[in-house]
Amino acid sequence: MRIRTVIPKGEARKLVLQRRKEISEAEIKRKTFKVIERLKEQDEFLNAKTVHCYIASREGEVDTRQLINLMQEMNKAIVVPKLNPVSKTFSRGCFTSWTEMIRNEEGYLEPAVGINDSLDDIDLVIVPAVAVSIHGQRIGYGGGYYDKLLRNLFVPKFVLAFEFQIFDDIESTTADTRVDKIITELRVVDVLKHSVY
């Protein structure tokens, strides 16, 4: 019987952030293309009319800006988060074009218009992660914003990640919401079905 080794959150975060510093822009672009190609094969993505998706803004992340452009071409409604730093929650913003985006106080892009808190029409949520386990345990950036959001979203939750962000098992608590699928440049991990393809 194999013993599962659980890596502490802080250690996993430190390892991935170091690896992110070592990946080149060209490699990010090449691997992001492969991740998106795998995402395009998923029924949940193909059938989703409205997708909640973060805008990549940190070093070494899967570039979701490529994905947002693709979803526009596919005529999907795109919802992006708007930060409320006081309540540590997200409002929703409707993505219409890059020219309608502004930078918030922390320097991240967010929508200037179309703000409300409704989640009723979301069909799929693309969740950012620093690190993620094959069991769906996700580490974010420590603010807790996405944990609050995901508790109120009863739809498929996907993480797009590079292989170096994946671990066998990560320390987690009952406050952490697990994701349903992890899509990398090499594979799809279906957490609910315990399958990899």
Image (spheres, rainbow, N blue to C red):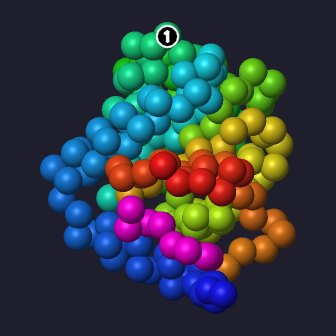
Q: Position of residue 182 (x, y in %)?
A: 54, 51
Which residue is at 74% across, 46% downward? Answer: 149
Task: List the single residue furthest toward the front.
Answer: 1
89 lies above or below 112 = below
Q: Position of residue 51 (x, y in %)?
A: 60, 27
Q: In this view of the protein, can residue 181 be seen by the observer?
A: yes
179 lies above or below 97 = below
Which residue is at 53% across, 58% downward? Answer: 129
Tell me the quadrant of the picture where the N terminus can be found. Answer: bottom right
Which residue is at 62% across, 22% downward? Answer: 48
149 lies above or below 92 = below
Residue designated by label 1? 75
Whether residue 31 sits left or right of residue 152 in the image: it is: left
Q: What amino acid is labelled 1 in the image? A: Asn
Whether residue 105 sits left or right of residue 83 in the image: it is: left
Whether residue 186 sits left or right of residue 24 in the image: it is: right
Q: Position of residue 146 (x, y in %)?
A: 67, 52
Q: In this view of the protein, can residue 107 be seen by the observer?
A: no
Magenta residue check for 59:
no
Region rendered in magenta: 163-170
